[in-house]
Amino acid sequence: MSSDDFALIADSLSKRYEIYESPRDRLKQMIVPRLRRMIGLAPKTYYRDFWALRSVSVDIRRGETVGIIGANGSGKSTFLQLVCGTLSPTEGRVKAFGRVAALLELGAGFNPEFTGEENVYLSGLLYGIPEVTLRERFESIVAFSEIGEFIHQPVKTYSSGMYVRLAFAIVAHVDADTLIIDEALSVGDIRFTQKCMRFLREFQRRGTLLFVSHDSAAILGLCSRAVWLSHGEVRMDGPSREVMERYLAFQHAADRDGKDDGPMVTLSPVAEGSAEGKSRPASDVLDVKDFRLEKWREAGPVNVIEVFDFAEPDGAASFGAGKALITEVGLRDVATGSKELFEGGELVELTIRAEVKDSLESPIFGFYVKDRLGQRLFGDNTYGVHRDSIGQAGPASILSATFRFRFPVLPAGAYSVDVALATGTQDDHTQQHWIHDAIHFRASESTMRSGLVGVPMLSIDLDKSEG
């Protein structure tokens, strides 16, 4: 296999730092060894070696998406900086083929005194993009970043989210062969994160991606392969699921070994029974408010999911042939009518309304619920149930579809809903209007500790028999 098959080759890569106990030792190291050599004595060192990376060999093929995982201090950032060329290795070598673009720690590569516009040109030129090309792409970069007039302000006035927006917008426009993302998507709002994830999934079709994250769902959702670094060395390299399972098991064992208060016990809510006279239309699912631990009684519901209203999409957030336009999307609790707060387990209705601009034949409504990484958690459409119930819809018609389902229990985090109206069949259809992130919601508290979604419980029984 030739080097043309690889995007990156790291061979016995090592990085050593000199650690000084005090500034005085650093000064001694500059002067004393030279004096000792002049008088014929063996040099003396005033530092200790710290190997941030030791003999790391990793070959990444073109088109791969590889996750880099490991605890803080394991050498992930050092490895990425060596790959990008911002650090030089102490030993070994690293060769990257093609243009490498990286989104590392916040503001890396930006001059804080320069405006956003000046930093666009500075960063682009450093990536090897001609100035004339940068001028052609400038408006697109600003539009992607969504920072508006702040592009003319010094970046030292930017929030962390604005740093990420601008930095990601730049790397999205530099025609990279290999893209490196280091925990940057943990900053920013759900809409921009979803935009970035759509770009990354599109980039995966044509380029090589190195993705660094502590989020196991992110690694599993994006990466086919993972490299686990531990204390500067490769602990495991293989399929992302196998590596992540081993890593999580190791972390769990390390957490338990670090405790001196006995085996770890996971507490689950204990049923206390419903209040007398209390009723709930969704009676086939337990009311989670009846499942609080004593210490949670005054804190309110265990699950808190806040839903944000539908907003008109911009051009980048929607697409379609345009024979119909979705004008309204709403989510409500059937029992209470609430459109703002949920807990999980409620019977809810998701309603999508659209205005027909041109004649439509057999319209199909559908939706997807996604997590912050763009992973589709669940969804449905009207084709199987109402395949021919509408038939043809003429101009100026108002169409609507209502999906009724149990709202799942969700881990804490940000989520969004894609909605669409299409024509045709399940397998062969034309999207008339698709809206990314039509509504979004955030789960700030949850009874879930792992997994992507939780199933609302019908009952929880606990029994004890004396032996």
Image (cartoon, rainbow, N blue to C red):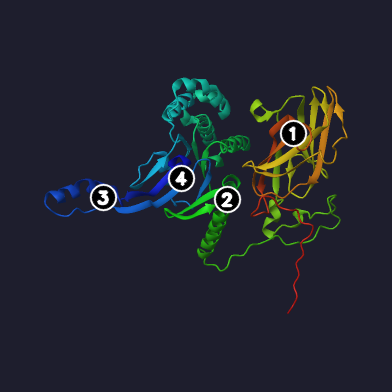
**Mark linked to residue 216:** 2
Look at the picture and state if 35 lies above or below 309. below
- Residue type pointed to by label 1: Ala
Does the CB distance between marks 2 and 1 fall below 8 Å?
Answer: no
Q: Nearer the viewer, residue 231 or 110?
A: 231
Circle 1 residue: 420
Q: For the residue labelled by badge 4, is the local secondary structure a helix, a strand or a loop? A: loop
| Classed neighbour count for the residue bearing mark 1: other residues with Cα under 10 Å, few (<14), some (14–19), many (≥20) | many
- The residue lying furthest to the left in this view is 39
Instruction: Tell me the number on the disc at residue 1.
Output: 4
Q: Earlier in the sequence, mark 1 or mark 3?
A: 3
Marked residue nearer the N-terminal end (1 or 4): 4
* Mark toward the start of the polypeptide (3 vs 2): 3
Q: Secondary structure at mark 2?
A: helix
- Mark 4 residue type: Met
- Could you say which is closer to the camera, residue 89 or residue 455? 89
Cα separation between marks 1 and 4: 45 Å
Please give the name of the residue rendered at 67% of the width and 42% of the height, measured from the top-left corner: 370
Identified at 39% across, 43% down, the residue is: 94
Category of crowding for the residue at label 4, using alpha-carbon neighbours closer than 10 angstroms: few (below 14), some (14–19), many (at least 20): few
Q: Residue type at mark 2: give it.
A: Ser
Q: Residues within 10 Å of mark 2 (few under 14, many from 20)?
A: some
Which mark's residue is nearer the viewer, 3 or 2? 2
Q: Are marks 3 and 2 in contact (CB under 8 Å)?
A: no
Measured as percent of width and height from the top left, residue 10 is found at 41, 46
Residue 4, compared with residue 251, is above or below; it is above
Q: Which residue is mark 3?
A: 25
Sequence-wise first label, 4 or 3: 4
Q: How many residues crowd mark 3 within 10 Å: few (<14), some (14–19), many (20+)?
A: some
In the image, farthest residue toward the front = 1
